[in-house]
Amino acid sequence: MADRSREPRVVIAGAGPTGLGAAWELSRRGVPSLLVERAEIVGGMAATRHRDGLLLKAGVHLVHPSNDALRPLVETLAALLGDELLRVVPTSAIHFLGHFLDYPFRSGQLATALGPERLLRVAAGAAEARALELARRALGRPAPDSFEHVVRTAFGEPFYRLFFRDYTAKVLGLPCDRIAGAWALRRVPLPTGRHLLQTVLPWWRPTRVDHAHSPFHRSQITAREGLQPLFDRMLAEGPARADVRTSTELVRIEHADGRVTAVVLRGPDDAHERREATHLVSTLPLGELVQSLDPPAPVAVRAAAARLRFRGLVFVFAVVRRPALFRHHWTYFQDPALPFNRVSEMGGIIPGLYGPDRTVVCAEITADPGEPAWDGPDAATIAATLEGLRRVSPVPFDGAVEAAYVTRERYAYPAWRVGFEADLALVLGWLDGVRGLQSVGRQGRYDYLNVDEAIAAGRGAADRVASSVAEW
């Protein structure tokens, strides 16, 4: 008979793609785990929710390989979906200076939107920025660490102000000179030399951007019900399926002698349960994780974690009795006067999802507690969103709105302010020194990950757990 006292006690906190990836890999390896999720369903921001019989997807969550190394993982996920698999090639656009531009830009589109005078200013500004950057390097002067500097150097002052400044400040809730340059390196396909000319001038078209988040469209996978069938099948695979508890929150992590010993959970009935644990895979936001430790982390670690700010997202869903409002599957809106940053329509990606003459428009608004979109009444947020949509929609839809709903995600974007790297290194360095504790994923590493990268991060954590279990 097996000695159950030697059985590993593995807890996974958070059932977004990272936590699901960890549970999936542990199950495949025969290692039992407990997966706890504070929401009512698994999937995190990529979860599929239903309201009044309608499928609601918060933003666009599809799966594609972020790099060549992740292609086998994505194909494994595709195989898991089986006959529910849908391969789609989505299209996106940018609403800029009143024009809807294909993204990536098609030949001549950007030049047309800019017009001859602006185009000349942009080209001159880009050339000037290159010359100034070469001079700075020749003089040995250090480069400022800011999104503003990185993008101005790459594109020039005129295009930075026209295209990037207001939109980025709206998304992260910070002025661009206070946003770390790493955000530009991660999120903006920065052109150099030929790429810059190809992007700006009408007779060239870029064929490739070497960037982790390239906008060049590839085949992506999903299912008719979004990614929920994939998550369900991940949890159903393997000989040691995870014990999944939703509406359950991790409220305390006990540790002693430099290692995790137990966790305290709060269930849907507000009852608390203490559970011994040898391993904890946490996908919690770093601030929450650090605050949950008992005994507390050092003061400097707690202070650093508190400075690692996340930007929230408000999702407004409008059910409209007409075909799709926009030609593209999702559109980014640069205008700072509009409340939303991006608008998507899953019914365009998955034809027939809502019937032939109905669409569900999802508008994304970045906001934090204390801002009207976050704290204000839903009715006001919906009204502002619908007014914004009326301003930009290529087709009228007055009188066609059936219903509207609002949901919120507190920890959507890691808001990388200038100097965040030092705080992050301090927090992760201390946490990584606690044996049995792994902080992983988008919120757990304060990183911007695609769905495939998040699942891979969870599998990597599971691999480390399984390796330590094998050493018993």
Image (tube, helix red, strand yellow):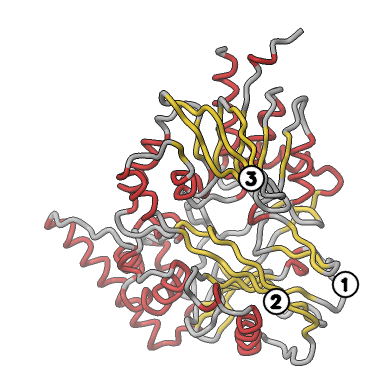
Pointer 1: residues within 10 angstroms few (<14), some, or many (20+)? few
Q: Are marks 2 and 1 in contact (CB under 8 Å)?
A: no
In the depicted structure, whether residue 35 falls above or below residue 2? below
Q: Earlier in the sequence, mark 1 or mark 3?
A: 3
Left or right, residue 22 beside residue 128: right
Q: Which residue is mark 2?
A: 327
Query: Helix, strand, or loop for circle 2?
Result: loop
Residue 273 placed where, x, y %?
A: 64, 37
Is any part of residue 10 visible from this angle?
yes
Which image quadrant is residue 119 in? bottom left
Task: Indicate which label's residue lies in the foreground, 1 or 3.
Answer: 3
Residue drawn at point x = 63 percent, y = 14 percent: 6
- Determine which of the numbered discs, if any, sits on residue 266 in the image: 3
The residue at the far top in this view is 1
Classed neighbour count for the residue bearing mark 3: other residues with Cα under 10 Å, few (<14), some (14–19), many (≥20)? some
Type of amino acid at the residue the image marks with label 2: Arg
Q: CA distance from mark 2 to mark 1?
A: 17 Å
Q: Name the residue nearer the viewer: 352 or 242.
A: 242
Give the distance between the C-alpha atoms of the residues marked 2 and 3, in whole angstroms: 46 Å
> Which residue is found at the position 56% from the left and 44% from the top?
251
Q: Position of residue 238 (x, y in %)?
A: 76, 28
Q: Are marks 2 and 3 in contact (CB under 8 Å)?
A: no
Q: Is residue 108 above or below residue 147?
A: below
Residue linked to disc 1: 355
Mark 3 secondary-structure assignment: strand
Q: Disc 1 vs disc 3: Cβ atoms closer than 8 Å?
A: no
Instruction: Report how far apart the C-alphas of labels 1 and 3 lie in the structure.
Output: 41 Å
> For the C terminus, which image quadrant?
top right
Tell me the kind of residue under disc 1. Gly
